[in-house]
Amino acid sequence: MAAPAANLKINGERLWDSLMEMAKVGPGVAGGNNRQTLTDEDAQGRALFQSWCEAAGCAMGLDQMGNMFARREGTDPDALPVYVGSHLDTQPTGGKYDGVLGVLGGLEIIRSLNDLGIKTKHPIVVTNWTNEEGTRFAPAMLASGVFAGVHTQDWAYAREDAEGLKLGDELSRIGWRGDEEVGARKMHAMFELHIEQGPILEAEGKQIGVVTHGQGLSWTQVTITGRDSHTGSTPMPMRRNAGLGMARVLEKVEEIAWSHAPHAVGAAGHIDIFPNSRNVIPGKAVFTVDFRSPDLSAIEDMETQMREQAQKICDDMGLGVEFEKVGGFDPVTFDKDCVTAVRNAAERLGYSHMDLISGAGHDACWINRVAPTAMVMCPCVDGLSHNEAEEITRDWARAGADVLFHAVLESAEIVD
Ligand code: HGY
Ligand code: MN
Ligand code: MN
C-alpha cells in the first residue's frame, strides 16, 4: 500500500480551536477541566463532540457503555474500519489535553480528509471511550475494558461513586446509554494519540513518542479499622489510630516502589479518613495503592510486599486491615505493524521521535487485546498531567495529529 504523501497535513489551527472550545465545557478552578465521567458536564462535552462529528458528515453510533463511534464511510463498506480515539472525561483537577487531544485529533483527521477530498478503502471511526479516568468510578479504562471483554457490563454498571451512585444509572440519567452491544464492533486497527503525561519527550527534545509498550498497573484498595476516640482524653497507649496505620503503610509503599527502581512507581492518590473530625482519632482509613511497572513480576512483588507489610503494621498496632483489588492490567506490547506505521509517519513527516513505554494507562491498552493497536504521543510541558496546569504547544499538538493522520491513512488505505 502506497504511503501517504509527506505534504498531507491536518489543520493545526482548527484542531487547536476545537481543543480550546472543548476546554470551556466543565471548566476547573485553575484553568484546566473538571469534566468527570457521566456528569452533566460530560454530557455537554459529548453533545458538542457529536455536533462536530455530524457537521463533518459522520454517523454516530453509541453502545450500552456510552462509548461513542463517529463513522466516516470508506469505499469498501465490508472493510473493517480503522478506529482512532481516546476519552473526553477528565480528572477533577484535570488538564485540557489528557484524552481530549486523541478524540479531537481523530475528528481533525475526518475534517482534513473532507477538505482534501480523500477517500479511503476502510471506513474510519472516531471514538470517545466512557470513563477512561476511573476517578469517579474505579477502575480506569472501564468501558474500553468492557469492550475488550475484560469486565462484564453488569459489573461495570454496578460500580459506585463516592456518593453511592451507580455507573449504569448515571449513564441513563445523562441520556448517553446506547443500544449497541458492547464489543460487537470489529476493528481493522486502532490508533490513539495522547500527551505523554511524563517528562521524557520534552527532556529529550523529541516531538513524537512512538509507543511500543504500556507499563502495567495495579490498584489495591486498603481499609484499615481502629477505633474512633477523643484526641484529648484518650491516653496514647489506648489509641487505635487508623490514620497513623495508613501513614506507616504509605511510607512502606514508597520504600517498596524504590526497591524496584528505576522503572517502578507507587503511591496512593485516593485517601479517605473517617470521621475526619479535628478532635477524633480516626477509626477508619480507606485508600487505593497504585503500583506500576513495565515488568509484571515487579508489580506482583510490590503488591505482595505491600499486603504483607501492611498486615504486620496493623497487627502490631491492633488495627484491622482488608485488601480489595479494584483495578489492574498487565504490561502491554503494542502491535508491531501499527507501531511501524507510526514510526514511518514520523520519519516521513520529518518529526523528531523516539520509542517510548507509556507510563500512564490508556484505552489502547485494552483495545490492543481485540485489534492491532498503537499509540502516538506528544510531549507536555514539564511532563505535568492530572493537574489543571497541564500544557502543550500548538506545534506538539499539530505534529502528533499529523503523525496520527499518516498512521491512520496507511492503515485505512487511500483510494485514488
Ligand atoms: O491512570 C491512568 O494511567 C490513566 O490516566 N487513567
Ligand atoms: Mn488519558
Ligand atoms: Mn488521565
Image: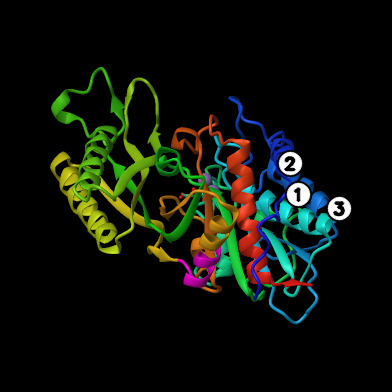
Q: Which residues are magenta?
A: 334-341
Which mark is first along the chain, 1 or 3? 1
Picture layout, residue 237 above or below residue 44: above
Residue at horizontal 33 percent and vertical 42 percent from the top = 267
Q: Judging from the image, what secondary structure is the residue with disc 3 in?
A: helix
Q: Is residue 303 left or right of residue 91?
A: left
> Where is residue 293 shown, x and y percent of the image?
32, 55
Residue underneath mark 1: 49
Residue at horizontal 76 percent and vertical 49 percent from the top = 49
In the rendered image, is residue 157 in sight?
no
> Which SS does the magenta portion mostly show?
helix
Quadrant holding the N terminus: bottom right
For the residue pair 106 and 157, the one nearer the viewer reads as 106
Indicate the amino acid at tag 3: Ala
Indicate the amino acid at tag 2: Ser
For the residue pair 108 and 147, the one nearer the viewer reads as 108
Quadrant holding the C terminus: bottom right
In the rendered image, is residue 201 in sight?
yes
Indicate the amino acid at tag 1: Phe
Residue underneath mark 2: 18
Q: How is the image coloured?
A: rainbow
Confirm or deny contact between disc 2 and disc 1 (CB under 8 A): no
Cα separation, mark 2 vs mark 3, equals 13 Å
> Where is residue 24 shown, x and y percent of the image?
71, 33
Q: Judging from the image, what secondary structure is the residue with disc 2 in?
A: helix
When asked about the image quadrant of residue 228, the answer is top left
Residue underneath mark 3: 55
Tag of residue 385? none
Cα separation, mark 3 vs mark 1, equals 10 Å
Q: How many marks?
A: 3
Q: Judging from the image, what secondary structure is the residue with disc 1 in?
A: helix
